[in-house]
Image (cartoon, rainbow, N blue to C red):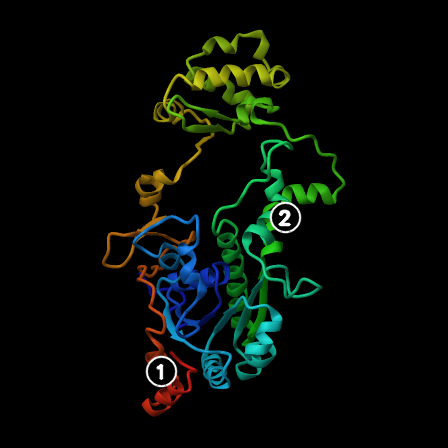
Amino acid sequence: MEDGIFEGLKVLDCASFIAAPAAATVLSDFGARVIKIEPPGSGDPYRNLPNLPGYPQSEHNFAWLLEARNKRSLALDLSKPEGQAVLHRLAAEADVFITNFPPAVRGRLGIAYSELAPLNERLIYASFTGYGEKGEEANKPGFDSNAYWARSGLMDLVRADTTTTPARSVAGMGDHPCAMALYGAIVTALYKRERTGKGSHVASNLMANGVWANGVMAQAKLCGAKFSERRPREHALNAVTNHYKCRDGRWIILSLLNEEKQWPALTRCLGREDLISDSRFATKTDRHARSLELIKLFDEIFATRDLAEWRARLDGNGLVFGVVGILDDIPTDRQMIDNDVLVPFEGDSLLTVNSPIWVDGSTKTAPRRPPNIGEHSDEVLREAGYDEAAIRQLRNLGAVG
């Protein structure tokens, strides 16, 4: 097995709150050396996410464990000229710089693309925003709950029907897909650099990713399509692409798009082969015309067995279905563990969520615990050429923590 694909790649993570830092995390999974730049004292405010009301209580800082693994921390005050000078020195030798500060803030902190690019013609400058970097909302702050989930129409469209309230998102639900988009932009720029020798500015944003996630319906609207009224589950137009409650309260979802072929197998698995010859449901057209009747029948059938029993009966019959998972399922999900979706921290039994891509023949870095605030400040500064006297002076000035 070869070393990580990005072994030797130097990345500056000058960002917070999931999407942009998570892109750096994926780079680190493939061997990149990532320096987390955060304010002295308080550190990255994302460290405090689990302390907010409503978040799960744990002895572990689960948010920081996930996003900051494999990274080294440099506590740097970018509001001070001396702190900016340190960052400029690091940027001159870096391969990738990642930030999610709004454009106006980047200018104030001395980290705008126009300031860093002249220092290093090979630098990939990756910026992430809520609503893009042009227009009246360029400097508007945003989280995935509003800029991705709400703005894109997803929050509205996943409602059971128009009478129910818009559905809330969960932490990081949009940020992590966005991180993969920013990672893809960075890798594309690295490929361009291989061909041209030049770095570039790449960007992504929450709003664009939200609309991309909702792209099928967004494109339909752009084409002037006529939309039907959203119907509740009990009134769905197709019973075999619907979800059903099992005896133990768990839910299962059918996704039978090849209905004509799969209908006989489904009836056998349900123990209702009589439905094959039932004139009410003989053809696809009949089943769709009587979807409410068939949904009611399926509700009664699925309520007779627990989820595990239904999984055993449906598996191996060419039927496309899924389990409506709950968090309690994840730690012991054998398929996730067998496929390295969940992996242990180095030298530990505690599991973490792996980045969702693999490359045959290339190792991924075993996840290392995230750093304390400024844990590696001196080490990073020495590598950048600062001697002990210069480091002490930076600390005395409050530029480094």
Total numbered badges shown on the rendered structure: 2
> To which residue does mark 1 refer?
383
Q: Amino acid at mark 1?
A: Glu
Residue at the far right: name it. 224
**Left-right relation of 267 to 330:** right
Residue 310 picture location, percent across and down: 38, 23
2 or 1: mark nearer the eye: 2
Q: Quadrant of the N terminus?
A: bottom left
Q: Secondary structure at mark 1?
A: helix
Above or below for 356 versus 74: above
| In-front residue for pair 252/103 | 103
Residue 10 picture location, percent across and down: 42, 73
> To which residue does mark 2 refer?
152
Q: Quadrant of the C terminus?
A: bottom left
Badge 2, how many Cα within 10 Å: few under 14, some, many 20+? many
Residue at the far front: name it. 53
Q: Residue at x 64, y 16 (%)?
A: 289
Q: In the picture, residue 292 is in which quadrant?
A: top right
Q: Residue at x 51, y 52 (%)?
A: 177
| In-front residue for pair 11/388 | 388
Residue 90 picture location, percent across and down: 45, 80
Q: Secondary structure at mark 2?
A: loop
The disc, 2 or 1, on the residue closer to the chain's N-terminal end is: 2
Cα–Cα span, label 2 and label 1: 44 Å
Residue 178 picture location, percent across and down: 53, 55
Q: Residue at x 27, y 52 (%)?
A: 350
Q: Amino acid at mark 2?
A: Ser
